[in-house]
Amino acid sequence: MRALLAGLLVVAAAGAGAPPAAAADPLAEPVWLCKPGMPANPCNQDAAGNPVESPGIVRYPDGSVVTLDSTTVGGQVEHFAAEPDPPVDCFYVYPTVDLVANPLLQLGSIPPAARPNEAAVLFAQAAQFTGQCRMFAPLYRQATLPGLAVSTILGADAYLGPGFADVQQAWDYYWQHDNLDPRTGKRRGVILLGHSQGSVAVERLIQSSIDGNPETTRQLVAAVLLGGAVQVPRGGIAGGGDDPDSTFQHLPLCQRGRGGRLPVGCVIAYSSYMPADGTAPGAGTLAWSNKPGHQIACVNPAALLRGGTATPLDTLMPTRSLVQGNVLNPNGHLALELLGYNLATYGTGFAHYPSVLTGECRYAPGDGGSSSWLNISGGDFLPASAGSSALGLHVADYNLALGDLKELLAAQTSVWAHS
């Protein structure tokens, strides 16, 4: 089962080529999993991005509450903090989590509806950022795991359906209606967040609406595209304007010279692996590029913050409480995605493991291509099977360095605001 899931998620994140025309019609309007000020907002934010209830409260579609507080391995509870009137926005697109289509009948413009698994993955990956940005997270009619399996068998496009058009529609609506600050009349900064299929959706959104567009690029604080197989020239940071094998032509990877200013308007991307025998993840993994002269992007957020190569990571893993697990189904709403993970049973939403893991971007040439990945070492709370899986630590890409990503994006927001 884990091998099958690994193969499907690799397809979900690494699919190439333009999606075919959607069989369903466009949505009448975007549908939101989280949107500031929406009634019963699962992300607990009013229109200005401030908590409606106590900071750190998030709600599942059925109204049940979980917390974003964390517990350290020593048992200390750390309470979630929210900055008043967050100065920038986040636009997040969740990964492949649907086993059946949402909506079940992909007819006309029937809209998707929020499900527990979609909320759970948002809470696990992106809700920690709600303390520093207004969170916009569209629901979209994504390619399902079984659909990806059929596409693989038939050699068809991995993204049959209208999902990416839904994401683009939601972005267009956000840009036209929500990015203008009603108090100042000025455009707000925005952080783009995606994972797996969600990263590919955001990559295509960037290609169509941001890359090479001065107006939108000016508002981009950063784009975090994990598990999405971003391609760059070998040793380079962007395509340069005429490179069809590079994901972006003008939008660069985030890089920082010794003592240099923290960059903004750039891309943070990686896929994480923990090879058991020290060998590079090869063909058939998210680390692998078969494009001549190119490689998969790897930007270590901890190294970008503090320098160095092999750096301690600030890890925040979801707990059984966050995903509403129980004795029979310990990983709750993300049982399939977190197969093999033994989640902590703290009453808080996260288990905090500061400096337990180490991350290092590595590159290895191979026959017919090359591998580039965030190499993870240390810790005894990650599944042993990850070392031999084509999936690696894909499902935990965000959580392995979630504390670092929070700190990095806060610092980039400050730089952007003062530039």
Image: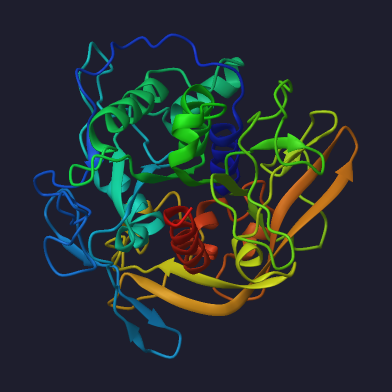
What residue lies at 45% left-to-right and 57% top-to-bottom? Answer: 418
Quadrant position of residue 417? bottom left
Describe the colour scheme in one phrase.
rainbow
Quadrant position of residue 168? top left
Quadrant position of residue 98? top left
Name the side, left or right, on which 26 lies relative to 410.
Answer: left
Name the side, left or right, on which 237 lies relative to 356.
Answer: right
What residue lies at 27% left-to-right and 68% top-to-bottom? Answer: 82
The count of marks equals: 0
Residue 400, relative to residue 1: is it above or below?
below
Give the residue furthest to the left.
39
What residue lies at 28% left-to-right and 27% top-to-bottom? Answer: 176
Name the side, left or right, on which 209 lies relative to 289.
Answer: left
Residue 342 visible somewhere in the drawing: no
Nearer-the-camera pick, 182 or 400: 182
Residue 144 visible somewhere in the drawing: yes
Rendered location of residue 378, percent (x, y): 66, 75
Rendered location of residue 396, percent (x, y): 52, 57
What residue lies at 54% left-to-right and 44% top-to-bottom? Answer: 265
Rendered location of residue 63, percent (x, y): 11, 54
Nearer-the-camera pick, 408 or 202: 408
Residue 286, relative to residue 339: is it above or below?
above
Residue 334, relative to residue 147: is it above or below?
below
